Amino acid sequence: MRAGLHSFVWVFWHSQRRANPGSWLGAMTTLRGVNEAGHARYTYRLRVLSPARTALLAEWDRCRWIWNECIARSKKAHQDGEKCGPAMMDKMLTEARAVTPWLAEGSSVPQQQLIRDFGKARAKALKDIKDRLPMR
């Protein structure tokens, strides 16, 4: 699982677990093996019931919309020669949550984390372009 998705699922799961203490989302952990250095390897299987699946998919849709909006704002800022950083994206998120009710329904924690992840990805992409690293 990618790091961004993993942190999103973890944050969402823990925030929902605190909000709804009932067992509506279960996780199963299996020990796969231990090597000589004493490192254990685990396999995780997330079993999601219908209400949790619906909530998780809705949150994922909101986060995907924010990611696409960050890309659009970043491209526009680059074309206009403006700076585009996490502070600008946070301001965009605050304005969008105030105007868009379906976006405000979701948790702000994964949305803010997504903006931080986007900032890191954008900074790395700009550094790679500057260093003339080949694109895949």
Image (cartoon, helix red, strand yellow):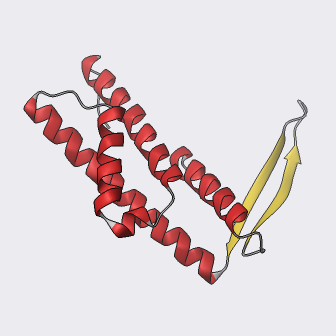
Instruction: Examine the image and state in which quarter residue 77 appears.
Output: top left
- Asked whether residue 1 appears in the rendered view, the answer is no
Q: Residue furthest bottom?
A: 50
75 above or below 81? below
Residue 56 in percent (x, y) is at 54, 69
Q: Residue furthest front?
A: 98
Q: Image point 34% across, 49% down: which residue?
A: 93
Most foreground residue, 76 or 6: 76
Residue at 76% x, 56% y is: 43
Q: Is residue 101 above or below residue 112?
A: below
| Residue 41 horizontal/vertical position (percent) | 80, 46
Image quadrant where one finds the C terminus? top left
Residue placed furthest toward the top: 131
Q: In the image, is residue 31 above or below residue 131? A: below
Q: Nearer the viewer, residue 123 or 104?
A: 104
Q: Is residue 37 left or right of residue 79?
A: right
Residue 31 lies, in percent from the top left, at 86, 54
